[in-house]
Image (cartoon, rainbow, N blue to C red):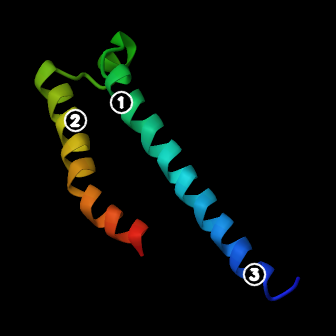
Amino acid sequence: MSPASAPSRRRWTIIGLLNAGMIIAYVSRSNLPVALTLPDFIQSFNLSDVDRGTLNSAFFWSYAALQIPAGWVVCR
């Protein structure tokens, strides 16, 4: 490996990891509301409407709160 290709390889590794993180975030964001509407899921965990709302809110509030630190990390 030549010294000139090392920064390029590192750059593509970082881009790949950031893309993987974005895909995981997208999938979790889109699947949680769907799972909370499935009757089998609701019955398995004995969830009330308030419980499902609390779970959804907890996920999205934490997701929103971590957007700023995540943006700072991506800029670095």
Q: In this view, does 66 lie above or below 31?
A: below
**Residue at the extreme front:** 4
Q: Quadrant of the C terminus?
A: bottom left
Task: Name the mark on residue 6.
Answer: 3
Q: Name the residue under label 1.
A: 32
| Residue ID at (44%, 38%) | 26
Q: Is residue 27 left or right of residue 4?
A: left
Q: Is residue 17 left or right of residue 6?
A: left
Q: In which quarter of the image is residue 47?
A: top left
Q: Which comes sooner in the sequence, label 3 or label 1?
A: 3
Label 2: element kind = helix
Give coordinates of residue 61: x percent, y percent.
18, 46
Q: Is residue 22 above or below residue 15?
A: above
Give coordinates of residue 56: x percent, y percent.
23, 33
- Can you tell which of label 3 and label 1 is closer to the viewer? 3
Label 3: element kind = helix
| Residue ID at (57%, 51%) | 20
Amino acid on which disc 2 is placed: Leu
The residue carrying pointer 3 sits among few (fewer than 14), some (14 to 19) or many (20 or more) residues within 10 Å by Cα, namely few
CA gap, disc 3 to disc 1? 39 Å
Label 1: element kind = helix
Amino acid on which disc 1 is placed: Leu
Q: Mark 2 points at which residue?
A: 55
Amino acid on which disc 3 is placed: Ala
